[in-house]
Image (spheres, rainbow, N blue to C red):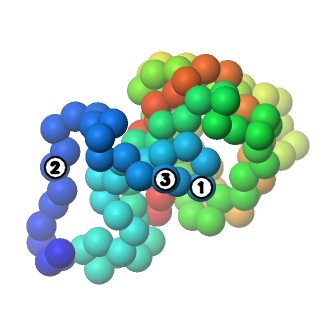
């Protein structure tokens, strides 16, 4: 993909998902597209049944998330837990350990940078 193009997706599309680390993902911008290895974005689909319970995640990139629907609890290391629900936004720095607990089936839009 050339550096001067952009990606448009019309809607969430469960038929366009693929396996992810946990749950599934619908990519809007795959890692490496547009010769930008450090930038990607997509929709993450996850349910409590797909997780092993609370998950400790150490971000491999800076990450900003927007919860489209559902509910998760996040607990950045050394901080109080916070519940994110539909409309909530959070941002994490690369390398910060965060414990995620998926409380309801959730759709999250994320950007890695």
Q: How many marks?
A: 3
Left of 92 or right of it: where is 16? left
Residue 85 placement: quadrant: top right
Q: Looking at the image, is mark 2 or mark 3 nearer the viewer?
A: 3
Give me the disc on residue 21.
1
* x, y percent for residue 66: 46, 34
- Residue neighbourhood size for the residue with mark 2, other residues' Cα within 10 Å, grouped as few (<14), some (14–19), many (≥20): few
Q: Verify CB contact (< 8 Å) between mark 1 and mark 3.
A: no
Q: Is residue 52 left or right of residue 89?
A: right
Circle 3 crowding by C-alpha within 10 Å: few under 14, some 14–19, many from 20: few
Calculate the distance from the C-alpha at mark 1 to the C-alpha at mark 2.
24 Å
Would you say residue 112 is visible in this rendering?
yes
Per the image, the residue denoted by label 2 is 8
Q: Relative to 6, is 38 above or below?
A: below
Secondary element at image label 1: loop
Circle 3: element type: strand
User: What residue is pinned by disc 3?
Assistant: 19
Give the residue displayed 52% in from the left and 54% down from the top: 20
Whether residue 88 is visible, yes or no, is no
Marks 1 and 3, how far apart at CA: 7 Å
Instruction: Tell me if residue 52 comes above or below residue 35 in the rendering.
Output: above
Q: Give the left or right position of residue 16, taking residue 75 as reference.
A: left
* Closer-to-camera residue (33/96): 33
Return the disc, 1 or 2, that comes first in the chain's sequence: 2
Q: Residue at x 19, y 45 (%)?
A: 9
Quarter containing the N terminus: bottom left
Rendering coords of residue 4 (x, y %): 12, 72
Of marks 2 and 3, which one's residue comes earlier in the chain? Answer: 2
Residue 68 placement (x, y as % from top left) = 42, 26
Local secondary structure at mark 2 = loop
Spatial distance from mark 2 to mark 3, Cα to Cα? 21 Å
């Amino acid at each position: 993909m050339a550096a001067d193009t952009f990606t448009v997706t019309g809607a969430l599309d469960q038929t366009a998902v693929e396996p992810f680390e946990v749950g599934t993902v619908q990519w809007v911008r795959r890692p490496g597209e547009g010769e930008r290895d450090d930038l990607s974005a997509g929709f993450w689909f996850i349910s409590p049944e797909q997780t092993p319970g609370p998950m400790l995640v150490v971000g491999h990139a800076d990450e900003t998330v927007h919860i489209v629907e559902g509910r998760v609890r996040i607990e950045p290391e050394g901080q109080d837990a916070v519940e994110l629900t539909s409309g909530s936004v959070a941002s994490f720095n690369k390398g910060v350990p965060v414990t995620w607990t998926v409380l309801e089936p959730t759709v999250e839009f994320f950007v890695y940078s």
